[in-house]
Image: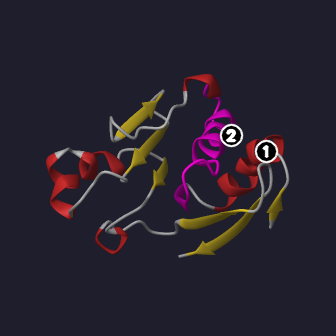
């Protein structure tokens, strides 16, 4: 699927939200992970302006509806336990994970794995795999 603009990226959330409550986002820096998460949050009735990448915080919680995790700086599975991230995952209906790692150990049933290929400054190719 080809996304041709930031507006299309924001509206893509609805289709994703109807397919799965758990999204695993895999792609390069600047490809639109946070923008996609903003659209997902908006669909849940959350102000998209408050959505930020949790790169340094590891997790952001939005209105107790959406758990947003960034595993970029997580080096080992034990870090997920020590930082309390594993305890959080099953407490939310909707979860977005950027840079997912150790997925086989997280028991995330029915998630969508989304890979985005940056084609140009505005175009992204979405490759979606249902697990």
Left/right placement of residue 78 relative to residue 116 reads left
Q: Quadrant of the N terminus?
A: bottom right
Q: Quadrant of residue 126?
A: bottom right
* Residue for point 57% across, 66% down: 112
Left/right placement of residue 11 relative to residue 44 reads right
Give the SS element for disc 2. helix
> How far apart are the alpha carbons under marks 2 and 1?
6 Å
As rendered, which of 21 and 128 lies closer to the eye?
128
Residue neighbourhood size for the residue with mark 1, other residues' Cα within 10 Å, grouped as few (<14), some (14–19), many (≥20): some
As rendered, which of 126 and 66 lies closer to the eye?
126
- Residue furthest to the right: 4
* Residue for point 41% across, 38% down: 54
How is colour applied across the structure in the image?
secondary structure
Asked if the magenta segment contains residue 53, the reply would be no
As rendered, which of 118 and 93 lies closer to the eye?
118
**Residue 38 at x, y percent in the picture:** 63, 37
Asked if the magenta segment contains residue 44, the reply would be yes
- The disc placed on residue 32 is none
Q: Which of pointers 2 and 1 lies earlier in the amino acid sequence?
A: 1
- Contact between marks 2 and 1 (CB within 8 A): the answer is yes
Left/right placement of residue 43 relative to residue 98 reads right
**Residue 55 at x, y percent in the picture:** 39, 41
Residue neighbourhood size for the residue with mark 2, other residues' Cα within 10 Å, grouped as few (<14), some (14–19), many (≥20): many
**Residue 56 at x, y percent in the picture:** 34, 37
How many marks on residues? 2
Residue that numbered label 1 is attached to? 11
* Residue for point 53% across, 76% down: 131
Q: Quadrant of residue 42?
A: top right
For residue 99, above or below residue 112: above
- The disc placed on residue 39 is 2
Q: Which residues are magenta?
A: 22-47
């Amino acid at each position: 699927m080809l996304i041709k603009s930031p507006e299309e990226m924001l509206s893509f959330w609805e289709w994703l939200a109807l397919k799965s409550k758990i999204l695993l986002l895999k792609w390069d820096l600047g490809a639109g992970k946070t923008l996609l998460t903003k659209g997902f949050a908006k669909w849940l009735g959350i102000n998209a302006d408050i959505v930020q990448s949790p790169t340094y915080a590891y997790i952001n919680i939005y209105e107790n509806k959406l758990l947003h995790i960034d595993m970029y700086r997580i080096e080992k599975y034990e870090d997920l336990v020590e930082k309390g991230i594993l305890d959080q995952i099953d407490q939310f209906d909707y979860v977005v994970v950027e840079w997912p790692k150790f997925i086989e150990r997280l028991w995330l049933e029915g998630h969508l794995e989304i890979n985005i290929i940056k084609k140009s400054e505005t175009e992204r190719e979405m490759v979606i795999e249902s697990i």
